[in-house]
């Protein structure tokens, strides 16, 4: 029986981070933690590209384009959608999550969901605190594990 599992060892290849500028008080912290986590696992700044998009809704379009280009071992998607008084939150959060999943399925490249969906900014800041409780750090670890797993799988 063959058992395959992505480890946190130093992966090969480049990584992309797609981050939303909207709610930057939160996303800046997610990005910093993701970059730091990648570095701790052997992925230096010279192997990471950071792409800023206006908001979370724009993440899937850019993530899919990057993943389809064949340059990246994984794409980490970071954003923050805070519930407001209208249905806008539901549409943005749902379509962003769906688009990120579709980008990974369409390209075969791990496209990692690091999207915070919270009721308040305070909740979002709590999820953007120091690692290991930072969603950006968790998303980067998932990207490393998935890149290593994909590299092991038979074609």
Image (cartoon, grey):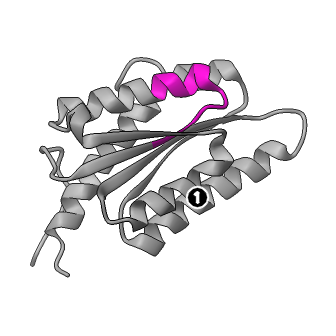
On screen, 113 above or below 4? above
Quadrant of the drawing holding the C terminus: bottom left
Q: In this view, does 128 lie to the left or right of 86?
A: left
On screen, 146 above or below 116? below
Quadrant of the drawing holding the N terminus: bottom left
Q: x and y percent of residue 111 in the render?
A: 42, 57
Q: Is residue 133 visible?
A: no
Q: In this view, does 1 lie to the left or right of 108?
A: left
On screen, 3 above or below 145? below
Q: Which residue is found at the position 37% from the left and 37% from the top?
A: 138
Q: Is residue 18 left or right of residue 74?
A: right
Residue in front for this viewpoint, 59 or 88: 59
Q: x and y percent of residue 147 in the render?
A: 25, 57
Q: Which residue is found at the position 65% from the left and 18% from the top?
A: 122
Magenta highlight on residue 58 = no
Magenta highlight on residue 20 = yes
The residue stretch that appears in magenta: 18-30
Q: Which residue lies furthest to the right in this view?
A: 86
SS category of the residue bearing label 1? helix
Q: Is residue 54 visible?
A: yes
Q: Residue furthest bottom?
A: 155
Q: In this view, does 143 lie to the left or right of 7?
A: right
Q: Which residue is found at the position 49% from the left and 62% from the top?
A: 64
Q: x and y percent of residue 102 in the render?
A: 54, 68
Q: x and y percent of residue 121 in the render?
A: 68, 22
To which residue does mark 1 refer? 61
Q: Within the image, what quadrant is residue 152 found in?
A: bottom left
Q: Which residue is found at the position 73% from the left and 49% from the top?
A: 92
């Amino acid at each position: 029986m063959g058992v395959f599992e992505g480890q946190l060892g130093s992966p090969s290849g480049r990584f992309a981070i797609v981050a939303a500028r909207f709610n930057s008080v939160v996303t800046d912290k997610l990005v910093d933690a993701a970059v730091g986590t990648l570095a701790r696992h052997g992925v230096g700044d010279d192997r990471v590209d950071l792409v800023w998009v206006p908001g979370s809704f724009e993440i899937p379009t850019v993530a899919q384009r990057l993943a389809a280009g064949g340059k990246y071992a994984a794409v980490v998607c970071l954003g923050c959608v805070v519930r407001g008084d209208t249905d806008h939150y539901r549409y943005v959060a749902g379509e962003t999550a769906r688009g990120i999943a579709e980008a990974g399925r369409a390209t075969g490249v791990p496209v990692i969901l690091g999207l915070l969906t919270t009721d308040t900014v305070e909740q979002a800041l709590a999820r953007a605190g120091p690692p290991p409780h930072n969603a950006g750090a968790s998303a980067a670890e998932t990207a490393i594990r998935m890149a290593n797993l994909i590299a092991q799988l038979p074609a």
